[in-house]
Amino acid sequence: MDKLRLRFKKTGRAVYISHLDLMQTMQRAFSRAGYELKYSEGFNPHPQISIALPLSVGTASLCELMDFKLRDEAELSPLPARLSAALPEGLEVTDCYEPTRKAALLKYLRVSGLFEYDVRDVEEMAQALRSFYSAGEIVIAKKTKRGMGETDIKASIREISFEAKDRAVELEAVISAQEPTLNPELLWDALRQLAPDIAPDFAKFTRLETYDENMEIFR
């Protein structure tokens, strides 16, 4: 069978499952659901399964994509429900299909965020955040494979908005997914580095949707 693609959610307590543990969890779920993954050949065979853009621990997602191959032909329509039933709470498969494009063509992510403030006025914080992110560049220190370096994250932010609500500021943004990759955690990190007076006391993020370079939904 050719390569297949899952779309799944990772929410609730499941956001604390690491990428490695998630891969192992998915492999066990396929087995429990009655599907046998296809393995690579060679001296160290491994299941042919991969997740596009692995999530950071603590980040939720409504639009995760996983490519895989099954050893035998299978009807795809019942697979999401059967696989979801074999997964722990917080992991839910919403679709399964034959992909028409490579994951390398995924270009943008829509993300939401919640910036929580213990004592500061959220209306004032929302306005200050809008001003901060309207700057022409936002250069931060970032760890790379070669050590610490500087990067301008503003170039990786296509859209960003803030709205005060209750004791928090809600964020919604469209950011670069690949080449370069912008982890939404860096939106918080930029504030801690460059504007600690408006940095939230706590922040959490959720992936909402995936897009190609033309801002069409990527599947």
Image (cartoon, rainbow, N blue to C red):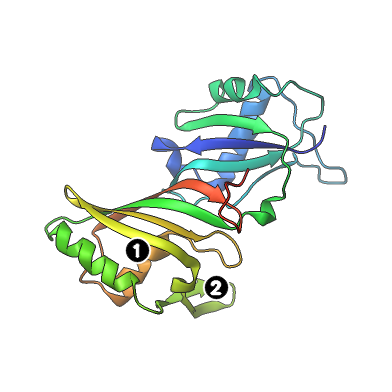
Using a 10 Å C-alpha cutoff, classify the residue at mark 2 as few (fewer than 14 neighbours), some (14 to 19) or many (20 or more). few
Residue 53 image offset from top left, x and y in percent:
58, 52
Residue type at the position of mark 1 = Trp
Using the rendered image of the protein, determine whether residue 2 is visible from the camera's viewpoint: yes
Q: Is residue 130 left or right of residue 108?
A: left
The percent coordinates of residue 19 (x first, y second) are 55, 47
Taking 117 as reference, is 37 left or right?
A: right
Name the residue rendered at 88%, 46% in the picture. Answer: 42
Mark 1 or mark 2, which has the lower sequence index? 2
Q: Looking at this rendering, what residue extends furthest in the right direction? A: 42
Residue for badge 1: 188
- State the mark number for residue 55: none
Q: Relative to residue 202, is residue 132 depicted above or below?
A: below
Q: Badge 1: how crowded within 10 Å, few (<14), some, or many (20+)?
A: many
* Residue type of the residue flagged with mark 2: Thr
Give percent across and percent down for residue 200. Answer: 25, 61
Instruction: Identify the residue shown where x is 47% and y is 43%.
Output: 61
Quarter of the C terminus within the rendering: top right
Residue 187 image-quadrant placement: bottom left
Report the residue at 39% width, 79% height from top: 136
Label number found at residue 144? 2
